[in-house]
Image: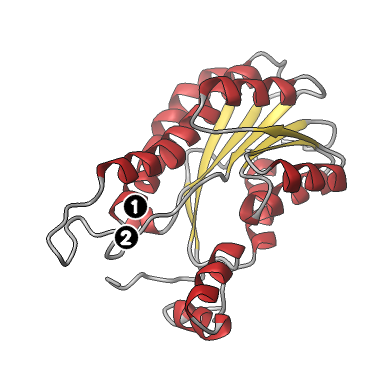
Amino acid sequence: MELNGTSAIVSGGASGLGEATARVLAQAGATVVIADLNAERGKEIADAIGGRFAQTDVADESSVRAAVQAAAGGPPLRVAVSCAGIGWAARTVGRDGTPHDLASFQKVIAVNLTGTFNLMRLAAAAIAETGPADSDGQRGVIINTSSVAGIEGQTGQVAYSASKGGIIGMTVPAARDLSVTGIRVNTICPGIIDTPIYTGIAGAGGDAEEFKARLTAPVVFPKRMGRPAEFGHLVRTLVENDYMNAEVIRFDGGIRFQPK
């Protein structure tokens, strides 16, 4: 899929993996819509990359529909990338015997899983209205973001892992469903990526570099956290390689999570 002269929408595009992806797609010639709740940062990034900003709650249908319409209002919409997500840590039953809070579990599912599906279905419908981009009849590409935690979650990650595992489970059936419209679907499962979320966690409990060193101990090689720009590069690769479809790709330096 040729990115130059197309439109793309990236949820969670105002920070972390989403921001890096938006920048990479823009560098390749796409007009990118940053779909995020953070208006100040989202507008700043959109201005920097020559894109547009749409304040978006991925769990809200009308909000995502408006963002997709904005993305479809310019060059043909060819790419949708879901990077919006939240984390949560709680045991199924706490040490004090308290069961996991149901509302918190539902919130994580609503944002991470339902939000991903919400953008995928609405963006796919808009992409399907465009003409074929090549002789294969291809119209677009959808990239969803899961996590290694969706494959081998750790203690306290029951809500997060359930949401990310659900995204993995959608990959193949969604790709089959959308094959008739010429849309490919792939899912990336990042491991430990150096985004602001880890710096924030470390800042609350001590030295950030020491904290990151503990996180990267199980990484096989290279012995470091992944970089957001590397994630963005992988997104671009999956978009541009026309034979990549219905795949779940680990992006983790070979890490295998320990129980906790």
Q: Helix, strand or loop at disc 1?
A: helix
Whether tag 2 and tag 1 are in contact, CB under 8 A, the answer is yes
Q: Which one is in front, 32 or 45?
A: 45
Report the residue marked by disc 1. Answer: 161
What is the total number of numbered labels drawn onto the structure image? Answer: 2
Q: Position of residue 59 (x, y in %)?
A: 48, 31
Q: Position of residue 174 (x, y in %)?
A: 44, 29
Q: Position of residue 162 (x, y in %)?
A: 31, 47
Task: Report whether residue 138 is seen.
Answer: no
Q: Would you identify the image quadrant in which residue 34 lies?
A: top right
Circle 2 packing at 10 Å, graded few (<14), some (14-19), many (20+), is many
Q: Would you identify the image quadrant in which residue 26 lies?
A: top right
Question: Which residue is located at x 76 percent, y 51 percent?
Answer: 24
Q: Which one is in front, 221 or 50?
A: 50
Which residue is at the far left? 97
Q: Helix, strand or loop at disc 2?
A: loop
| Side (left or right) of 156 relative to 11 | left
Report the residue marked by disc 2. Answer: 153
* Looking at the image, residue 119 lies above or below residue 209: above
